[in-house]
Image (tube, rainbow, N blue to C red):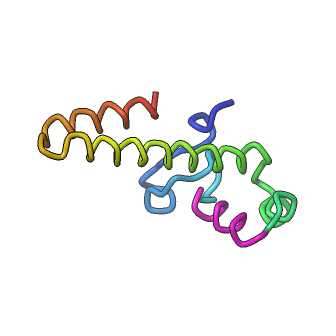
Amino acid sequence: MSWQERISVNPAVRSGKTCIKGTRITVYDVLEYLAGGMSEDEILSDFPDLTREGIRACLAFAAARERRLSKLGSVKLLFDEDVSLMLHCASSLLQEDFR
C-alpha cells in the first residue's frame, strides 16, 4: 500500500495538516517522535490507533516531499529567467506526486 492510501489532508482535522487516515495523528508528529529517538514499538504503544504501516507511510511521505522539493529547487535554477515555465514545471511535478 502506498503512502497516498494512508495519508490524508482534511481541513476539518488538525487544521488541514497531513494526518494518518482515520486518526488525528499528524505526519509531523510521527516524524518528530522518530527523530527524537522513539522506536516504532514505543510510538505504537503510545498510540494504539496507529499501525506500523502508518509510521512507514509517514516516512515515505517525507521522502516523497523531500524528492519533490529537490526537484522544484532544480527547476527554479534551470528556469529562473522564465517564471511562467518554472510555474508550469513545478505544477507538473506536484501533480505527479499526488496521482
Q: Is residue 97 magenta?
A: no
Q: Position of residue 82 (x, y in %)?
A: 12, 40
- Residue at 17% over, 34% down: 85
Q: Position of residue 35 (x, y in %)?
A: 69, 67
Q: How many marks?
A: 0
Q: Is residue 9 above or below residue 47?
A: above
Residue at 53% of width from left, 44% of height from top? Answer: 8
Q: Residue 20 vs residue 16: left or right?
A: right
Q: Of 11 and 32, which appears nearest the observer?
A: 32
Furthest residue toward front = 78
Instruction: Give the residue displayed 26% in from the left and 46% down from the top.
Output: 76
Q: Is residue 69 left or right of residue 34?
A: left
Nearest to the observer: residue 24 or residue 52? 52
Q: Is residue 98 left or right of residue 64?
A: left
Q: Which residues are magenta?
A: 27-37
- Most frequent secondary structure within the magenta stretch: helix
Residue 5 position (above or below residue 12): above
The residue most toward the bottom is: 36
Residue 31 painted magenta: yes
Location of residue 81 by image quarter: top left
Residue 78 pos. (x, y %): 25, 40
* Quadrant of the rendering where the N terminus is positioned: top right
Comparing 76 with 47, the one in front is: 76
Horizontal relation, residue 86 to residue 40: left or right: left
Percent coordinates x, y for residue 89 in the rendering: 27, 33
Determine the residue positioned at 13% across, 38% down: 84
The correct choice, above or below, for 46 with respect to 73 in the image is below
